[in-house]
Amino acid sequence: MIIIIGLLILAAAAVAGVAGFFNNTGSGHAVQGTFELFGYHVTGSTGTLFLFGAVVGAIGMLGLALLLAGARRTSRRGQEARRALKDTQQQTAASSKHRDTLVDQRDSARAEAASAAQERDDLTRQRDNLTKQREDLLDQRERVYAPSPGDSARARQRVRDDLVSQREEPASRRQHINAAAPGTGEVPLPNEK
């Protein structure tokens, strides 16, 4: 809409300039006295003077238009730079937040890994202890069932009773622990026969 209004005003100014020039030509419209501009003496009719004025006005308007276009362009560049800066700051903030989230996840994963490693080490120690107990029990069983020539029946019976009591002690302790805290994930002892 503004462009159409601007074109109409420009056309009206062009018509007025042409009409002003042609209506003021001839000897009846001669410039009276001297009219000088930058050392140039203007002679001729008032229409010629009007035409020079229109040309000077058009040149002035062109300069003003260039000045405003440059200012508009500089303003637009400033707005784009501010918008780009704001976008960059938002991206930086989002990246920082994402980085902090990743650092938190990494720290959590490290803590979980350390906890799992500790639990694994504890379970390995329990397994090793149970394996040693089993080996000890197997050694004791072999001694009981492989009588020496000088062993008496009573001595063998005492060793058997000791083995049975040792076997029942961890089982009763395990039952006591499971009754106190069910679902603790206690590792069961090897099958007892």
Image: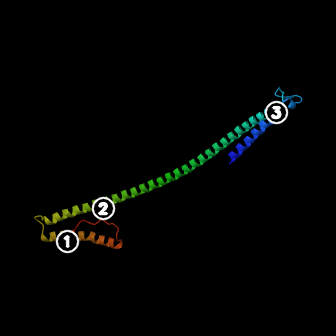
Q: Nearer the viewer, mark 2 or mark 3?
A: 3
**Earlier-in-chain disc, 2 versus 1:** 2
Q: Nearer the viewer, residue 116 or 46?
A: 46
Instruction: Please tell me the numbered disc located at residue 139.
Output: none
For mark 3, what is the residue?
Answer: 47
Q: Is residue 65 left or right of residue 179?
A: right
Q: Nearer the viewer, residue 128 or 74?
A: 74
Instruction: Please tell me the numbered disc located at residue 161.
Output: 1
Label 1: which secondary element: helix
Q: Residue furthest left?
A: 149
Mark 1 surroundings: few (<14), some (14-19) or many (≥20) residues within 10 A: few
Q: Is residue 188 left or right of residue 109?
A: left
Label 3: which secondary element: helix
Q: Quadrant of residue 75?
A: top right
**Earlier-in-chain disc, 2 versus 3:** 3
Mark pair 2, 1: CA separation: 26 Å
Which amino acid, mark 2? Answer: Gln
Q: How is the image coloured?
A: rainbow
User: What residue is drawn where x is 52% and y is 50%?
Assistant: 95
Q: Quadrant of residue 3?
A: top right
Which amino acid, mark 3? Answer: Gly
Which amino acid, mark 1? Answer: Asp
Dots 1, 3 in contact, CB < 8 A: no
Mark 2 surroundings: few (<14), some (14-19) or many (≥20) residues within 10 A: some
Q: Quadrant of residue 26?
A: top right
For mark 2, what is the residue?
Answer: 126
User: What residue is drawn where x is 80% and y is 34%?
Assistant: 22
Q: Nearer the viewer, mark 2 or mark 1?
A: 2
Residue 89, position in %: x, y?
Answer: 57, 49
User: What residue is drawn where x is 80% and y is 36%?
Assistant: 20
